[in-house]
Every structure is written in C-alpha cells, then in structure tokens.
Amino acid sequence: MSSTETVSDTRPEESSGFSTRQALALVALLWTVALNPITGLLAGNAQAEVAIHFRTTQIAWFTLGAALIGTFLTPFAMKAAAMYGKKRVLVTITVLGLVGDVIAALATNYETLLVGRVFAGVYGPSAFIAYAMARDVFPKRLVGTASGVLAASVGLVGLGGPFLSAWLLDSNGFRAALWFIACSATACLLLQLFCIPESPVRESGHRMDWIGGLLLGGGLTAIVYAIGEGSHWGWTSGKTFTWVGLGVLAVLVFLPYEAKTAHPLVPLSLIRRRRVWTVFLATSVAAGATYAVGTVTMILTLMPEIPGVSDGLGWSVTKSAVVSAPISVLVIVIAVLAGKLARRFDTRILLAIGGALVTAGYAVGSQLHHNEWQFIVMGLISGPGMGLVVSIMPIMVIQSVAPEEQALANGSQWLVQGVMQVVITQLVFTTMTRDGAVAHGTQFYLDAGFTNAFLLVAGVCAVGTLLVAAIPKARPVDTVEAGQAA
C-alpha cells in the first residue's frame, strides 16, 4: 500500500463531503466532460445558418470533421495519458482544440472554418481522460459520487444547452455560437491548469506505439467516416464497402500486431478479461442507443408539420427546451445519486434497471410522441434510466481495472461507444428515411418513420440490458485503489 493511499484512508470518515480543493477539481472535470457535448450541440444547431452563409453543399464536414479527428487521436491520447500524466495530456489537447475554435470563429471563408472545426476535434478525447482522473483526484468514498456528477453533464447540457443555443443563434447568429465555444474552451483550460492536480499514476517502462495507434485510430476513423457518409454514398455502394473494408482490415491487423509488440497501445490481456470486455460491450450498446435517440427527438420536434410530407411537430427550439427540461432534471438528479447507489447496490443491477427504463420509455414513446404531455410521460420513464446508464458506466470501468490501466480502459470504452453511437444513429436515419419524403431537395419524415426509429432504439437498448447478465460481479467501489493525487 502506498503512502498516499494510507494518508487517504486515515482521513476522518465523518468528512464525507467534498473539500474546497476537491470541489474545484470536480468543477474543472465537469466542465471538461461537458465541453464536447455543448460544442456539438451549438455546432449542430448552427450548421443550417453556416451552410446558407457560406453557400456550401459540404456542411456535413462542419460536424463530421471534428468527430473523425477525435476518433483518430483517441488511441494516442489514452496511451499518452497513461505514460506522461493525465493532466498534462488534458491541458495539451485543450490548448490545441482552443486554437481550432479561434480559427473557426475568425474564419472568413468555409475552407478556413473547416480547418478550425477539424482542429477543434483534437480535444475530443478530453472527456474520457476526465473520467479516468476522477479515480486519481478523489478518495475512495467520493470516487463514485464524483463519477456520477461528471455523468450528470449530459443532463446539464440537455437542460441549459437548447436555451443557450436559441439565445445565441436567434439573437446573434452563428458567429456568437463559435465565439462562445472558444470562450468555453478557454475557461475549461484555466480550470484544468489551476484546479486539477496531476496524477502520479504512470505506466512504467513503456513507449508510444505509433504503428498500433495508426492501425487502430485509422481503422476506426475509416469505419466512422464510411458510416457517416453511408446515407449519401449509398449503403451498398463500392465506396462505402471500400472504406468499411479498409477500416476493418486495419483493426484486424492491429490485433495480432499488438499481441507481438513489446510496448502495446492497449494490452490485449486487459481486453481479454471477461469483466472488462463484457462491461465495454454492455455499456457501449446501452449508452450508444441512449445518446442516438437525441437524433430522433430533435428532428421530430423541430421539423415542420406538412400534411403528407412531414409529420414533425414544428416546435421552436425554446419550446423543445422547455418540454425536455423535466427529462434533463431527472437525468441530473439520478446521475448525482448514482455514486451513493453504487456504494450500496451491485452496479450490474443498477445498469440493468437503467437499461430497462430507457427501453420501456422509448417503447412507450414509439406510440406516444405527438404532443407535449406525451413527451413528458416518455421522459419520466426514460430520464431516470438514462441517468443510471451514463453514470454507472464509468463506475463499472473503475471497478474493472487497476489505477495504471484506467486511462487505457476509459479510452477503449470511449472508442467502442463512439463507434456504436455512430452506427445506431445512422441506422436511425435509414429507418426514418424509409418512411419519409423529399420535397424541394429536403428530406422530411413521416410518423411511421419516427415510430420505427423509437422502436429501433428501444430494441438496441434492450439488447444492451440483456448483455449485463454476462458481466461478472466486481469488487465494491469503496474497495478500489483511489485518491493517488488527493
């Protein structure tokens, strides 16, 4: 047992809350986790205005470019965090991402804007590093609670993000949104520099596996790119098959290469552990479906109602935010309580309950999604489930690995979940398009498409819930080694 752990364990147990220093660290990590979703929300809502302003037909790259660079860099970021320190890597990628944000905000043409947005994707891996740091920054009794609070960022962004987006875009245009993103990244960087201690946990005697990183990062990026463009190219087109095939081939080559290299990017012994791979699989399927459903609800509520063409509800961004607020509040409350629940109950049971609630909520939503009260009913069922899924997920990863493996494990789970989310999202679009109509060059969706999309998400989440049964029992969260930087 290390001296730091001994000190952590001998602190008075009655001091169960966060100290001022720990609270500041928690705020810094929370802001780091929330930076990506708030950036994605603002960029997603701004893309229509950006496309019109710059007269471009290539608007998909406005959001896809950042996602691709984030996917490519994640393997390198998780290895660097394990080798050189999580805070050091976190600060570095946030600085580089901030440079991209400023370039995008200052851009006078679409090409420069894309360069900035793609460069901003460098801080895509920051969220999983923040989750990994929670184990190092907080003592055992607070690790679960801190992880739950970080997961509550999903609800915070869902609660305040739409109002913020409506205010910025409706009142000041897309430039205001881009500058807000840059200001948020600046504040995030300052909090990281001054409020987060560096973790002493390191991988010893290892070097960066550049070839492995190129194979894994490049392979997954090719797959994500192909899936993102699949609806445009055609799912059975040669171009789609080529990119997917190259990506799959790179990942397949990565596996035997990692087994032989002296300094692997991701030790295959880690992935082969039943506790680890089953947690990755179940949480990635459940969380991927949970996040993908936002695509359905956003299109359903904001698309206009045009008889025979579009069965959208035609709400304003503000009305959509008001109706979804109760769901976001439930997500926040449950996520914050998840740490305490994880200290008393088996995390597998909590994940299964969360998955079952999300499945039931969106099964109900497949039939009831035509007015405000039906949306609220759907949210009252699915909101607590979403809060459990997103908050129990990082706690289960903490239970499954040693401290020096934490960054690698969180990064690996993040990669699997990201790919799963892209796949499910594209399946959602394909499902809605089958019952849709094109008018004046714009794709609209009919009610049958929304019904089937909700059923698809519910079905995938049900599969994730069933996969929980394969996860072996883990040690209680209070017994894991933690607090090395406390």
Image: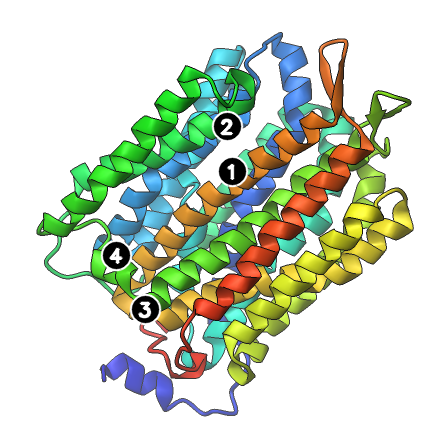
Above-or-below relation of 332 to 434:
below
| Residue 196 visible in this rendered orientation of the protein | no
Residue under label 2, please give it: 228
Q: Horizontal and vertical percent for residue 333?
A: 69, 67
Q: 10 Å neighbourhood of mark 2: few (<14), some, or many (≥20)?
A: many
Sequence order check, earlier mark of 3 and 1: 3
In space, the residues marked 2 and 3 are separated at their CA atoms by 32 Å
Sequence order check, earlier mark of 4 and 1: 4
Q: Horizontal and vertical percent for residue 82?
A: 25, 56
Residue under label 3, please give it: 401
- Looking at the rendered structure, the secondary structure element under dot 2 is helix
Q: Nearer the viewer, mark 4 or mark 2?
A: 2
In space, the residues marked 3 and 1 are separated at their CA atoms by 26 Å
- Dot 2 amino acid type: Gly
Is residue 153 or residue 341 the one in the foreground? Answer: 341
In space, the residues marked 4 and 1 are separated at their CA atoms by 27 Å
- Dot 3 amino acid type: Val
Q: Verify CB contact (< 8 Å) between mark 4 and mark 2.
A: no
Residue under label 1, please give it: 422
- Dot 1 amino acid type: Val
Q: 10 Å neighbourhood of mark 4: few (<14), some, or many (≥20)?
A: many
Residue under label 4, please give it: 82
The answer to which image quadrant residue 203 occupies is bottom left
In space, the residues marked 4 and 2 are separated at their CA atoms by 30 Å
**Does residue 152 appear to the left or right of 483 in the view shown?**
right
